[in-house]
Image (cartoon, rainbow, N blue to C red):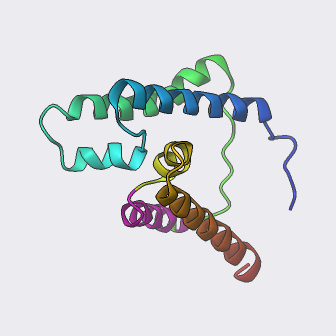
């Protein structure tokens, strides 16, 4: 395994982790809800009265935040070692997986593990393990 030291940003990663943890804690304390992105976005697909505004504001905040960041720091160049077809298939598989697992990395991996949920531990181990296997197969077996 090689680390791309020129693009390794531990301080930015730490800041992002702190912000995610703080946002998750505040969200559950102020709203009594788990900060699971797939659940928040999924709630927009079957909206309930009085439940749309905060969900739209949350999604809008996720879309606007990178632009605000770019006002203060230069945007980083994204590097994706896959074609558009693979990216679309991967996105669809992630979407199916979040529905099948009743949550995503933010809901299970961040919020669920911090609440010491056994179900979230199993879900996180399953999707992380599946990710490791997929990367190994795609990079080392399929080439």
Residue bounds of the magenta highlight:
86-102
Locate residue 138 relative to residue 38 in the image: left or right.
Answer: right
Whether residue 24 is in magenta: the answer is no
Residue 92 percent coordinates (x, y): 42, 65
Most extreme residue toward the top is: 72
Looking at the magenta stretch, what is its main secondary structure?
A: helix
Q: Nearer the viewer, residue 89 or 77?
A: 89
User: How many numbered markers are drawn?
Assistant: 0
- Asked if residue 83 can be seen in this view, the reply is no
Q: Quadrant of the N terminus?
A: bottom right
Q: Residue at x 51, y 65 (%)?
A: 90
Q: Nearer the viewer, residue 91 or 48?
A: 48
Residue 70 percent coordinates (x, y): 60, 24
Q: Nearer the viewer, residue 129 or 114?
A: 114
Q: Residue at x 38, y 67 (%)?
A: 100
Q: Nearer the viewer, residue 102 or 136?
A: 102
- Asked if residue 73 can be seen in this view, the reply is yes
Which of the 4 image quadrants contains residue 59?
top left
Residue 126 percent coordinates (x, y): 56, 67
Residue 24 percent coordinates (x, y): 49, 33
Residue 75, above or below 81:
above
Residue 115, above or below 10:
below
Most extreme residue toward the left is: 49
Locate residue 132 relative to residue 103 in the image: left or right.
Answer: right
Q: Residue at x 71, y 32 (%)?
A: 14
Q: Residue at x 51, y 43 (%)?
A: 115
Residue 111, above or below 132:
above
Q: Quadrant of the C terminus?
A: bottom right
């Amino acid at each position: 395994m090689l680390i791309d030291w020129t693009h390794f940003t531990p301080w930015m990663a730490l800041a992002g982790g702190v912000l995610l943890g703080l946002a998750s804690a505040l969200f559950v304390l102020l709203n009594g809800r788990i900060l699971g992105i797939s659940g928040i976005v999924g709630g927009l697909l079957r909206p309930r009265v009085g439940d749309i505004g905060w969900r739209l504001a949350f999604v809008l905040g996720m879309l606007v935040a990178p632009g605000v960041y770019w006002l203060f720091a230069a945007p980083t160049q994204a590097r994706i070692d896959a074609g558009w077809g693979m990216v679309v298939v991967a996105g669809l598989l992630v979407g199916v997986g979040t529905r099948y697992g009743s949550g995503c990395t933010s809901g299970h991996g961040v919020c669920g593990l911090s609440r010491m949920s056994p179900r979230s531990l199993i879900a996180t181990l399953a999707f992380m393990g599946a990710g490791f296997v997929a990367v190994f197969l795609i990079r080392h077996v399929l080439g």
